Amino acid sequence: MYRDHTIGVVVPAYNEEGFVGDVIRTMPEYVDRVYVIDDASTDGTWNEIQHFARQANSTRQMIRSQEFAATSTDGGVAFDQRVVPIQHETNRGVGGAIKTGYTRALADDIDITAVMGGDGQMDPELLPRFLDPIVEGEADYAKGNRLLYREYRRGMSPWRFFGNSILTFLTKIASGYWKMMDPQNGYTAISNHALENVGIDGLYEYYGYCNDLLVKLNAKGMRVADVAMPANYGDEESNIEYPTYIRKVSGMLLRNFLWRLKTRYLVLDFHPLALFYLFGAVAASLGTLGVGWSLYSWKRLENPLFVRIALSGLLFTTGSMFLMFAMLFDMQANENREVQFHE
C-alpha cells in the first residue's frame, strides 16, 4: 500500500521481449497488484512475463510469510498473487490492453491504478509523483508531461516534439483541459472513483486512448494533474505507424470534441459556448468558401472582387471571433479542473 491506498499498475506489452521483465522486476514494493497484459505478441514476451511473474509472486509470498500476511485490499481480502499475467488471443492495441488491466483493477477494488509501459521507458521511482495528487485529493487523474522544461525533453527528437506539440493543441481543444501538455504520455494514474465513472468499456483501443480518456474525464467533471517528468528513450522500437496514427487520432479527436460539447454543455448542463462553437465554425467555414469563390469568379468570370471578398472576409472574421470567445468560455469553465506539479 501507499499512504493507506491500495495501488495497482497496468503494464501493456506488445513485442517487449527483453524489456518487460525488467519492468516487473523493478516495480516498487508498495505496489499491491501488477496487471501485465501481453497483447498477442509474436516474440517471447509472454514467456518472459510468465517467468518474471512467477519469480515476483514467489518472492512476495516468502516475504509476507516471514512478516505478517499477503498484500490485502481495503476490505482485508488477501490477493492470491501480486503479478497477474494476462494474454490476449488477438491484438487489440495498447488501449485495449489497458482496458483489460483497468477492468481487473476495478474488480479488485484497487484505490489507484497506474499505467507503466512494458518498454521500460517509465521510471518506477517517479510513481509517487503520480500517486500523491490523487492521494491528497487534488486530482482524479494524473499524467506525465515531458514538454514543460527543455532539459526534460532533451531525449525527444525534433520530429517527435513537433508532432506532440500539434497533438497537444488539438487535445486541448477536444478535451477542455487547456493547461495540459503532452497528452501522448502514457505514464498515468487514475482513482477508483474516476475509473468507475469514465466508461472504460468505450475507451479507444488504438494509440490515441490517452487523448480519448482525457475527453471522457472532462465530460464527467474530473480533475486532472499534469506531472512534470523527463523523457526517457532506450533501445526499444516504436510500434506506431505514423500516417495511420495521425489519421485515426485526428478523426477521433474531432468526434470526441463534438461529443463533449453535446454531453457537458447541452445534455448534463447548458452553456452558450456550445452555440458559440457551432456558429463560429459555420460562419468561418462559409467565409473561407466565400473567399475562394470570390477569387475564382474574379479570375475566371471577371466579376468584381472587392464587395464579394470583403463580405466573405467579414463573415470569416466574425466566425473566428465567436470561436475565440467559445474557447475563452471553455477555459473559464475548466479553470479549476487542472493542477500542475513541477519539480
Image (spheres, rainbow, N blue to C red):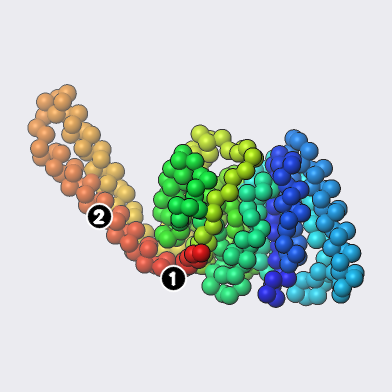
Tell me the element at label 2.
Answer: helix
Residue 319's spot in the image, x, y percent? 26, 51
The amino acid marked with disc number 2 is Met
Going from N to C along the chain, the mark reached first, 2 or 1, is 2
Residue 82's spot in the image, x, y percent? 80, 61
Q: What is the crowding at mark 2: few (fewer than 14 residues within 10 Å), some, or many (at least 20)?
A: some
Q: Residue at x 82, y 42 (%)?
A: 47
The amino acid marked with disc number 1 is Asn
Q: Residue at x 76, y 41 (%)?
A: 45
Residue 132 drawn above or below residue 146: below
Q: Residue at x 89, y 64 (%)?
A: 62
Left or right relative to 233: residue 90: right
Residue 268 appears anywhere in the view = no
Residue bearing mark 2: 321
Residue 342 appears anywhere in the view = yes
Residue 56's spot in the image, x, y percent? 82, 56
Depth check: give the residue in front, 329 or 139. 139
Q: Residue furthest top?
A: 300
Q: Which mark is residue 336?
A: 1
Depth check: give the residue in front, 37 or 218. 37
Left or right relative to 298: residue 144: right
